Image (cartoon, grey):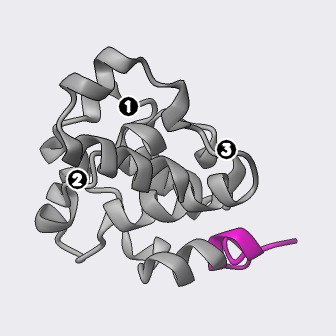
Amino acid sequence: MLLSGERVRSRLVTKVEEMSGQRVLGCYQCGKCTAGCPMASFMDPVPHGVMRLLQLGQVSRAMRTAAVWMCASCHSCASRCPRGVDLARVMESLRLLILRGGEPKVRPEGLPAELLMRAPQQALVSCARKYQG
């Protein structure tokens, strides 16, 4: 029989912790990250829900959530967390794990010319960094 602490120590959870520099079990599910997140209403599950999936060792399920891609990396979650967990860094780690396993999600040559002309350059660079790994 596995104890919950043993189960959480999966290879992928350890990888997420190494990449992000955050302790998954540091989160005690208070929900302050979700309450302060400007993107939480677009996420499924909400930010602390992603942390709960990781705590349960369900990394592959967490990687399939919309929340990973909706995170704006604004670090509001980190500023509100009483335990000092920077969830934005965890989300970034999950995105990197996804991207390193496959093809890039955004190809500049596939973007409409109108978007390239209208969009701020900073948005395009940010998009490339976020989705290209």
Residue at 46% x, 24% y is 111
Q: Which residue is mark 2?
A: 33
**Of the residues under marks 1 and 3, which one precedes in the sequence?**
1
- Give percent across and percent down for residue 90: 44, 65
Q: Secondary structure at mark 3?
A: helix
- Give left or right: position of 71 versus 37: right
- Give percent across and percent down for residue 106: 54, 37
Q: Does 75 appear in magenta?
A: no
- Give percent across and percent down for residue 119: 22, 29
* Residue 103 found in image quarter: top right
Residue 7 visible at all: no
Residue at 39% x, 76% y is 26
Q: Secondary structure at mark 2?
A: helix
Q: What secondary structure characterizes most of the magenta part?
A: helix
Amino acid bearing label 1: Met
Q: Which residue is mark 1?
A: 43
- Give percent across and percent down for residue 55: 56, 63
Amino acid bearing label 3: Arg
* Disc 3 packing (10 Å; few <14; some 14–19; many ≥20): few
Q: In this rendered view, identify the residue nearer to me: 49 or 108.
A: 108
Residue at 21% x, 58% y is 77
Residue 33 visible at all: yes
What separation in Å lies between label 3 and label 2 (alpha carbons)? 20 Å
Q: Which residue is mark 3?
A: 61
Q: Which residues are magenta?
A: 1-14
